[in-house]
Amino acid sequence: MPPDADHLPPHDRPGSASELIPTVTRFVRVLRRRRGVVFNSLLVCGFLGVAYYGAATRLYQSTAKLLIIQQKQDQVASVGDHDSSDNTMATHREIVTSPIVLKSAIERLAAEDRIDLVDRAPDDWAKQIASRLSASVTRRTNFIDVSYRSKRPETAAAVVRAVIESYLHFVRETHVGAAGELKTVLTEERIKLEQSLAQKQSLLQAFRVEVGHLALPTDAGVVEPIVQRALKFNESLMAAQQRRLELQSTLASIDGALARGEDVNQHLVGVEQSVGEQMMLMTLGMSPQDMNVLAEQEKKLLAAQDDFRKLSAFMGPNHPQIAELQLQIANLEAYLREYRSNLGGRFDANQNAQLGALVKDMLRQAVGQAQERERQLAASFEQARRDAAQHSGRIVDLQMKERELARIEKLHDLLCEKIASVDVRQVQAPIHVTVVREPLPEASPVSPKLRVIALACLFAGFTIGCAIVYVQDVLDDRFDSPEELTAQLGAPVLAIVRDLEQVDGEGLAGIHAFVMPDSPATEAFRTLRTSITLNPSPSQRLLVSSSEPGDGKTTIAVNLAVAFAQAGKRTLVIDADLRKPGLTTRLALKSLPGVGDLLVADRPLEEIVAECLHRTAQSGLDVLPTGTRRPNPSELLGSIRFAELLAWAESHYDQVLLDCPPVLAVSDAQMVGRLVDAAILVVRPEKNHRHSVVRAVESFHATGCPLLGVVANGISAELGGDGYGYGYGYGHDAISDAGDPYPPPSKGGARGGISDAMESQTLHLVADVETLSPIRSPQERGVSDPVRPRRAA
């Protein structure tokens, strides 16, 4: 896994999808390089697995299957009915493993079947059984699998059998016990209701006697006598009031007739019957015979009317006696009217006043009698009304008591029905359990399983090994291979330079590419030159730098300059490290004029540059040292004068190399990076931390300086076999039989770096390119030859 991911460019961070595959690939390479750690982890885990398999106690399992069928009210639920089935199955699964069932099962076990409880206290027996017992519900079915593991196959089967028997007993007892308790409660409630019912009935009967209720059916239409009495008084009162009003009206009409002088006789017909009879007898002057006749007929009429009233209460209007009485009454009334009309002709006009006064007196007496009767009837009605109202209230109380009694009777009937249904449910249980598979002893153990242990050891060993490799990789924080450099930095590895041996000599005499051009170590610089030449990006002005001091950037820059010069390119190497000039010191050019003097001079650049350039012993290679130390190197390197210097160098040389300070130490390299075509970063994998190199690359990206590639420097022989392998078994002094100046590489180390075959093909391609397209000199490009000093480096 790439450390310091926060320092990577956004497109190179492992969080992006484009970095997932490179990250995994890099970790796979790390695993390959550290495969010994993974192998040792697998060995240790395998050894532990074998030890566990040999020492583990063999456990045997026995399993039984139960079918749970839920009985619904008035019907039996089908096996596939899942309405509330999940809750039922989960409940019974918990019941199977409940402590009360397990304790009962332990009591059913024989002594030889308690081998799993030998070293346990009796209080922990249920927990011990529960730890090895399992109950699982088969999904979308009504089956429960009950399994138990034991040291002995027969014991496992015996425990499962005992658990099932205990479970069945618990379910049966729980159901019957619950039904019995419910029946007891209902029976007690029924007895209480019966006692209350008897008490209510007695109270109701006594209240009826007290009220005097006749207990008539309500649908008969019969009214209570007390209420009926009040109604009769009310009817009589209304009749008396009507008679009084009639008498008063007749009296008023008689007064009006007398006042107007009218004949009173014509008003006697409307006078009340009894008053009229008396008036006739007293005022008409009839003979006693007429009076007797009238009296006799009146008696007959009254008797007939009396008989009619008596018989009307028992006989209908069509009865012969009723019809005969009605005819008799009509005849008598007609006779009396005719008789009186005949007597009326006897009256004369002189008797009108006397008759009127007599009629008025009789009417006044009749009105007084009617008023007295009305008063008596009103008092009687008021008393009857009060009695009826009081009686009606007690009747309402009686009806409420009757409704309360009916409610209690209904509740008593419901309790009786409930008790009957409980009796039926005691016979038929709501849950029906069937053992569809009996527990049997199994001959082969279920634990430990060799295949499971092997897979667990492989997984644990590989996981632990990967974790150790990851921790080592994070703690190491070094680049392990060119592929990792390329993946982390997003730039190719241009060349891999071995750890060069020290060469005694001053100036170019101490440079490997100049002193030993045909040695295997020098091939790395030619490879670097080839990579730069074949790169499609512009690379005439190159900056050479590193992330930290001591990475060998000066060695790479001067050897690369010699390699370019050896290829026939006019090359200029500039020491742009104005703070600590390593190139100037390496070539013994201290105290000589150089970049610092050129940048602060007042004369034109073309006039003073000849004084600062120094020709070397290598043909085509010139050096521009740092010159006099200046206090403001960053300002000098960022000045227009330095840009003019680079423009002049580009016009006079085929290749310009600048040795700059480390990127992370100072900002000089970033200032120069804005003026060159590309940069080359020198990395020492054994020394540089990954985050430092990543920050250096980000610095170039931030200033807009393209990074041409990376040079892996200082590769030791220890790294050559795994990460940075490179074949150094050939050189220019070894010519093959076919005349090929690049013999086949040795088989010593082809893994990790640029392969030897690719290097050989690249050198062939460079030779062909240089042969077909020779490098033009500055004169051929129309540029005058720079003035060179006589002093050689």
Image (cartoon, rainbow, N blue to C red):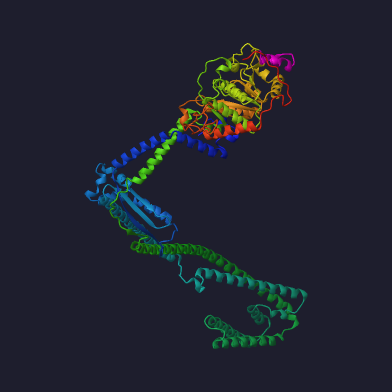
Residue 780 visible (yes or no): yes
User: Which is nearer the eye, 72 or 281?
Assistant: 72
In the image, the segment drawn in magenta is: 593-612
Q: Quadrant of residue 706?
A: top right
Please identify the quadrant where the C terminus is shown.
top right
**Could you tell whether 497 is left or right of 634 in the image?**
left
Q: Residue at x 69, y 79 (%)?
A: 268
Judging depth in this view, the residue of 337 and 68 nearest the camera is 68
Q: Residue furthest top?
A: 591
Looking at the image, is 556 positioned above or below residue 411?
Answer: above
Looking at the image, residue 241 lies above or below residue 664? below
Q: Residue at x 57, y 68 (%)?
A: 376
Examine the structure image and report whether residue 535 is included in the region drawn in magenta: no
Query: Residue 683 location in percent, x, y?
Result: 55, 26
* Closer to the camera in the image, 409 or 664: 664
Please, which residue is most extreme toward the left here? 111
Q: Chief secondary structure of the magenta span?
A: helix
Decide if residue 26 is on the left or right side of residue 778.
Answer: left
* Image-based side of 38 in relation to 100, left or right: right
Residue 660: horizontal and vertical position, in percent?
61, 21
Q: Is residue 490 visible?
A: no
Residue 421 at x, y = what percent? 38, 63
User: In the rendered view, would you say 138 is above or below 581?
Assistant: below
Q: Nearer the viewer, residue 733 or 237?
A: 733
Count of numbered marks: 0
**Snapshot quadrant of residue 8:** top right
Residue at the far right: name it: 260
Residue 461, position in %: x, y?
A: 39, 38
